[in-house]
Image (tube, rainbow, N blue to C red):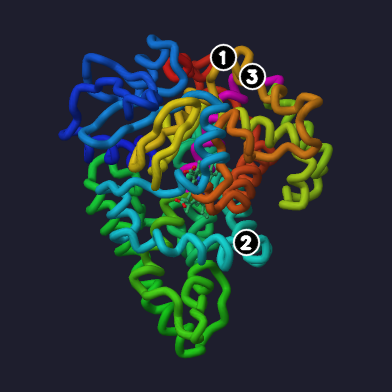
Amino acid sequence: MLSHFNFLLFLFIISVFPIFTKFKSKTITKSKPILLPPGPAPWPLPTFRWIHGFMKEMNTEIACIQLGNIHVIPVTSQEISREFLKKHDAVFASRPITMATEYSSGGFLTTAMRRVLASDMINPSTFRLLHDNRVEEADNIVRCIYNQCKISTSNNCLGSVINLRNTVRQYSGNAIRKMILNTRYFGQGKKDGGPGAALLDLDGHEKTVREAMNTINKYHDPIVDQRVEQLRNGEKEAEDLLDFLISVKDSNGEPLLSVAEIKAQCTELMLAGVYSPSNAIEWALAEMINQPEVLSKAVEEIDSVVGKERLVQESDFQQLNHVKACIREALRLHPIALFNLPHASNSDATVAGYFIPKGSHVLLSRLGLGRNPRIWEGPLNFNPERHLSASTVQAVELNEPNLRFISFRTGRRGCAGTAFGSAIAVMLLAMLLRGFTWSPPPGQEEIDLSRVKK
Ligand code: HEM
């Protein structure tokens, strides 16, 4: 299935593809010959695999692909990524304008709200406030899997086959929707925690971006309209992220955001928040099933921290280092998209000794960073222990501020939902491990992951 990030990046590429021209490395001025990064001479179709391929062939960790008058700069090095998004964070803090970002942001209505989001909405106090909304979903996922098991075992199966992808996506989708809109997508009113009749297709495989956005908006817009009315008439208190968006006031005490802006922001958060945690957990569990000793170690850790008498709580996370190391390893080895969301430069800059013209689109390669053999020993091995070495800080975190791989990324255009995303991911994996015993599907000795480890 196509993830949100793949989807946006795919559209980003096709929206600029028709205007590409043959790339030629060039100097900027005669007196100051700072070169553009190296790039390909012949011009085949610029797929992401192809970009990685030619960078490997040219033995370079930064490149330049010229699409019309736009310079696209893919990067696979930790050090150069840090230069772009740490040293020059302010220069590369914009998103390029593409068809996909226009639709997903409701015509760029979310762009101006970055300040509101960061400072007023998604902060530690809202995170604490929405604890119960998140935790409710943890109970639901256990019930949902348990009920699937009951159905299989009543059909005389030895074990039960669970559709892990659907299950983890339901959890992420519902957890994020509970925090934003205080309601669920799936299983509204159902007792089994599983999907109800109305399924929301966020994938965009079969639909165009516009149709996908219409689908999402059809679900959310009536809730937003009703909520705006309730809050502005004083009929309810602020309880979730939507309420906070509606309640933010400007210096004159007037609502800061229009209804259209609020709707666009809800959509963006929803898109950003559903797939990243579920993708990481799906991969982590698949790898752990293939390495029973890694899986057992995580289960033992949960047993020793949580005990047998109660369910996992967020206050346990601090001590679940092996569980978190498994998620970090999944984020490193199996990123949700080959590249990070693009960053556009608002002025000329010199990075890694190369001239990066104003308006360039910088694409940090998630795959290139996470699997860079210069940084990671045995990069294709799933080895959570590497995140538990002596040099690691005591409590493992999912974030990777040094950009050795990309998880949330901090900084001006970093992930707005780092705390929420971490909490959803850790709870999801811990609950799956705590509640159930996992093994490959019947007839398979292990899950075949060879195709994704090339
Ligand atoms: C495991 C979970 C998650 C991971 C690994 C993740 C990772 C990321 C990354 C790498 C970016 C791009 C940063 C950049 O461009 O340099 C991003 C952006 C973003 N994320 Fe997350 N994320 C996760 C969960 C969430 C959640 C739960 C939310 C919402 C509550 C969220 C909201 C956002 C938003 C709004 C952006 C766009 C920020 C902007 O353009 O200014 N993310 N995320």
Q: Position of residue 190 (x, y in %)?
A: 48, 60
The verdict on residue 292 being magenta is yes
Marker disc for residue 267:
none
Q: Along the horizontal axis of the image, is 142 left or right of 214?
A: right
Name the quadrant containing residue 1. Answer: top left
Q: Closer to the camera, 28 or 320? A: 28
Q: Position of residue 304 (x, y in %)?
A: 83, 37
Sequence-earlier tag: 1 or 3: 3
Q: Which residues are magenta?
A: 274-293
Tag 3: amino acid: Gln
Q: Residue at 54% across / 14% down in the picture?
A: 445
Cα gap from disc 2 to disc 1, whole angstroms: 36 Å
Residue denoted by label 1:
373
Tag 1: amino acid: Pro
Task: Decide: few, some or many residues near mark 1? Use Cα within 10 Å; few <14, some 14-19, many ≥20.
Answer: few
Task: Decide: few, some or many residues near mark 3? Use Cα within 10 Å; few <14, some 14-19, many ≥20.
Answer: some
Q: Closer to the camera, 36 or 440? A: 36
Sequence-earlier tag: 3 or 2: 2
Residue denoted by label 3:
291
Q: Closer to the camera, 22 or 78? A: 22
Marker disc for residue 123:
2
Q: Along the horizontal axis of the image, is 52 left or right of 80?
A: left
